[in-house]
Amino acid sequence: MHALPERPLSTKSWHVVYQGFEPAEERLREALCTLGNGYFATRGAAPEASAGVVHYPGTYVAGCYDRLPSRIAGRTVVNEDLVNVPNWLPLTFRAQNGDWFAPERFDLLDYRQELDLRQGLLSRWLRFRDAAGRVTEVAQHRLVSMDDPHLAALQTTIRAVNWSGALEIRSGLDARVSNRGVARYRGLASKHLTVGSTGADGDLIWSDVMTETSAVRIALACRTVVRASEPARGETHAQPGWIARHLTVAVGRDEAVTVEKIVALHTSRDRAGDGPAPVAAARRAVARASDFARLRERHRLAWARLWRRAHLDIGGGPAQRTINLHLFHLLQTVSPHTVGVDAGVPARGLHGEAYRGHVFWDELFVLPFLSLRFPEVVRALLSYRVRRLPAARRAAREAGHTGAMYPWQSGSDGREETQVLHLNPRSGRWLPDNSRLQRHVGLAIAYNIWQYYQATGDLDFLASEGGEVFLEIARFWASAATFDPSTDRYDIRGVMGPDEYHDAYPGAATPGLDNNAYTNVMAAWTLWRALDLLDLLPPRRQKELCERVALTEDEPARFEDVSRRLRVIFHHDGVISQFEGYENLAEFNWEGYRSRYGDIRRLDRVLEAEGDSTNRYKASKQADVLMLFYLLSADELRALFARLGYRFDRETIPKTVAYYLTRTSHGSTLSAVVHAWVLARSDRLASWRFFLEALDSDLHDVQGGTTAEGIHLGAMAGTLDLAQRCYTGLELRGDVMRLAPALPPGVPGLAMELRYRRHVGLRLRAGPDGVRVGLPPSARPPIEVALGDGPVSTLPPGHTLWLRPGRTDGRA
Ligand code: BGC
């Protein structure tokens, strides 16, 4: 292998360019070059690659899971995985008497890969020489259609630079795949597909499989067409789980041959599909599909429409490109096509197998951004939770509570999917996993429902299933809180906060912590908002909703009482304590461990391997208390703490931020997002550094190898929300849009178009001279806007407001 010298990544805003073939980097590039459309996604593996040390091709369909039992550490555990479905990519070629092409096997003269974010196109240009001295050039383009979510296409142009003769092309569908993308999970069962059948009809081939236990039928069909001066000869080769077209064509010296592979993917989960036999739909779709050029054009137009709604201008520079990359991957994971699919927000995108494609609380970092851009997608994603309300109710009942207890990790049916054991790769030990005690996931769902309502004014959702979920979550917390007459307060015991380094008191026999500040304060917030929600509804709708959740007459009073008397622990100096007893933990020797180990982001693994535990120390994996300042504005917190009867003065936020800042290892990519946010107003430079770190999370794989297993969608979307809501100071509260820009040093200005309260194309521009908000002309009612907590102005359609700190608001 002769890789060309590596050049730095292109700084153009719309392209990610890789020069040279780098086996050690391939898996990372594959994750970052994933193409998808919200229905399915395919990693950016080369078409000729098969799963191994260097490559990991993977295709995942949103919401398509399968459950398998495994024997590990003497126990049987059951895990549910987002299924790696058959690979539609396989395509390679050979010159007469030569080897099948793979970059490792030939003398590479040039190799360049480019992801075009604007067009949603992955391209590759390469030139190589074989042992016989024959030089061949290849240009390859691929798309996963944003226009028709069932289609994908690959176009390959092969030029015989200095030779002529027969060229053989092999284009196949490979169902012999399994979930082997994450080394840590190798001890677990991974074969989710039962190989069904393959078949051919002229140049059309198909593959039909079923998942092992969830019985989802998945069908791929493809057509491979060769465009050359001479007609191609074709035959079909098949073996179990594999089918391919072999096409042979004569190619002249310096002549090019173009091969188009058009693919359709359908499953038995499709709505308006062919029910249990999706293979018929896939065959029909591919037979009707147009050629690559037309598919590409429609795909480009679909992306152009998305970009118009999604575009976020942060003033250019390299950060702009990463923002575009993050928007791109966000929209490939959840898009308008998600609306028709029963799927949640997978923490690692549809880009790999880490966390088994499960849905965590990460939507908290994703949906508020989308609510102001793609509210219909947010409603669909919230519906994923709505449909799993019965499972959450069952879980609450089984835990001895009322209301809804959503699982920490969620998959197909809403049961708890968190693994019971996890592997520490450092020590090789399988350890109990208590992270399911992160009951706060329900609070994230409630927060998102409220944000969605604030952004859209969709009272219908609040009056129906959205309100039902909200009230059931509130009810859960009212029931989980226990009253302590000695303190005259309610406690929430035996939970975990977002910081996964603390799951138990040191030496305790049972896991769980008491009075996690984040959980208690957000529970108080949720209970308070639940009361607001009821007040918002007209009497009849209120009555209907109360009937729907069988809310008893005394429950609102209980909500009120608990929301006023939940306990929050403070340190002696007024810093909010992460949980009861945190102050008694030992200080951690950060410097010592940093100099010994270098990277200590995964301190939990380091200490466990040493026979120690993070539970003993004042050391956090990620923001926990600070999440409060991330989600709620200082004004809102002040009101909330006052209601709880606690002091919350000017110093509470900066003091608490400074305290935890020095005690956090940032072992989750979410941590940098939250820190950038909470520092935005007090230390603009530090905020900017965290913002840059969050931007680098996946592009430069800052967690050392994790991005190859899937992107970190929460961190990606979190950076977008930093630009959209944090640096503009955009807060949606009480039917008012409040703005208070605080731009970080590297951002000269911010410009975007939002959807707000059914106004399409609200223009927002923030710069050093304040912020301008403009509404396009329409028949919609005016909106209310304010600079920070200043007076509220009314903005009618067709007008612009220029809000300048220190100036009276003025219409421009
Ligand atoms: C973080 C969680 C997060 C999960 C999935 C973990 O490492 O600690 O907060 O939800 O990853 O992204």
Image (spheres, rainbow, N blue to C red):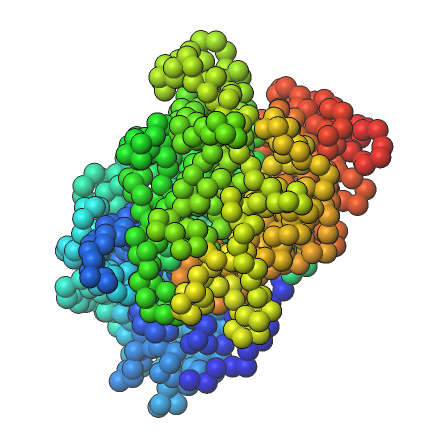
Task: Specify whether 716 is left or right of 285.
Answer: right
Image quadrant where residue 387 sits? top left
Residue occupying the far front of the picture = 486
Residue 744: x percent and y percent? 72, 51
* Residue under the point 57% across and 66% down: 589
Residues 798 and 352: in front is 352
Residue 546: x percent and y percent? 40, 15
Q: Check the image and report above or below for 757 versus 370.
A: above
Residue 123 visible in the shown view: no
Q: Check the image and report above or below for 528 versus 323.
A: above
* Residue under the point 23% across and 63% down: 73
Residue occupying the far bottom of the picture = 132
* Residue under the point 44% across and 82% down: 108
Residue 303: x percent and y percent? 50, 47
* Residue under the point 57% across and 71% down: 592
Residues 581 and 714: in front is 581
Residue 272 visible in the shown view: yes
Task: Specify whether 388 is left or right of 313.
Answer: left
Residues 791 and 229: in front is 791
Task: Specify whether 650 is left or right of 400.
Answer: right
Residues 105 and 430: in front is 430
